Each structure stands twice: as structure tokens, then as C-alpha cells.
Amino acid sequence: MVTSVKLQDVFEYSWWVYLAFAILLLFALGLIIYAIAKAAPYLKRQKKIPSVARRVALTPGMLLALKNQYVSRVQEIINGYKGGGVSKREGYQQLSLVIRSFVHEVTGINVENYTIKEVRAMGIRKLDLLMEEYYVPEFAEDEKARDRDLEKSCVSAMGVIRSWS
């Protein structure tokens, strides 16, 4: 007895399988595009650091007066520390404020919220080294600031202020 059997091709009768696959593929592609569109602003976001200091129009006489004013403010910090009215940490915080205010008045750049890395990237000569000197004692615990000398840091700051051009 001869029997003939005709087998059907795989998915010959199921066009809906192809349609479901295409829909899933389009959905996955849509999710990928959506994720990239949402992540793009975060990938681009970097803090803009001014590359060159913007100069404020200062005459030599005005600059000298500013230097003298800020040197005397640093001297007041030393006197307060020696007199016992200012702790080491408070002295470093005041020194930080004085230096950053001086840079703001001379360059026009508000460096109060800048980190050492950002200041270094701006290329302001000697400021990054000076900031490194007071940065740890300003923010760290008192134990980490024990080996720092506030008077020496103040003298360094006065030197930088006097040599500013």
C-alpha cells in the first residue's frame, strides 16, 4: 500500500508570526532610540570652564591700591590668629575668602565656587598652588590640618597678591 503524505513548510500558514516579529523588532528599535535621546543631554553635560581670565580694566594705581587692601586683610587674619581670636580653621576659611575675593576683583571671574581643578584649567598663575595650601585645612578635620602653618600660608598669599600683574 502506497501512502503519500505532503508535509507543509515551516510557518507557511503563519504570516502572523512574521508580523509579530516585525512589531517586536520595531518596538525594540524604538526603545533604543528613546534611551539614546534621553541619555544624550547627560553625556554632553560638562561644566564650562572659562579658558582665559577676563580682565577688568584696572589702572596700575587701582591695582596697587587693591593689592595693599588685600595684603592688609591677610595681615588682619595673622593678627587675629596670633591674638587667639581666630582658630586655625577659621583663619584658613577667611584666607580662602580673601584670596577668592581678590581674584574676583582683579580678573572679574567669580572663583568662589570653583575647585582647584577648575582653577588650574583656567590657567590663573600661582592661584592653584595657593588654593592647594589652604584647601585641606579649610575643609578637613583639625587633625589633618595640624601640620599646616597658617602664618606661613598667609605670607605665601601676601606674596602672590603682591606679585599679581
Image: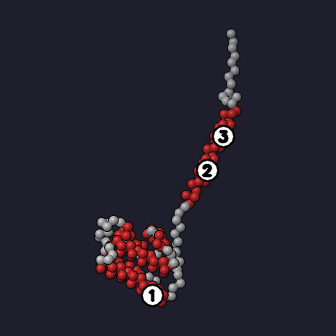
How far is the residue under mark 1 from the one under mark 2? 58 Å
| Drawn side of residue 123 relative to residue 144, left or right | right
Residue type at tag 2: Tyr
Q: Earlier in the sequence, mark 1 or mark 2?
A: 2
Please identify the residue farthest to the top as the structure is shown. 1
Mark 1 crowd level (few <14, some 14–19, many ≥20, 10 Å Cα): few
Please identify the residue farthest to the front as the structure is shown. 85
How far is the residue under mark 3 from the one under mark 1? 74 Å
Question: In terms of depth relative to the viewer, which is nearer, 8 or 50?
Answer: 50
How far is the residue under mark 2 from the one under mark 3? 16 Å
Q: Which mark is residue 34?
A: 2
Residue shown at the point (41%, 86%) measured from the top left: 68
Tell me whether circle 2 and circle 3 mark residues in contact (CB < 8 Å): no
Residue shown at the point (65%, 37%) measured from the top left: 21
Does residue 5 sit above or below 21 in this rendering? above
Which SS class for mark 3? helix
- Mark 3, residue position: 23
The percent position of residue 140, horizontal first and vertical second, equals: 35, 66
Which SS class for mark 2? helix
Residue type at tag 3: Ile
Q: Earlier in the sequence, mark 2 or mark 3?
A: 3
Residue type at tag 1: Ala
Mark 2 crowd level (few <14, some 14–19, many ≥20, 10 Å Cα): few
Q: Which mark is residue 65?
A: 1
Report if residue 129 is visible in the image. Answer: no
Of tags 3 and 1, the one toward the viewer is 1
Which SS class for mark 1? helix
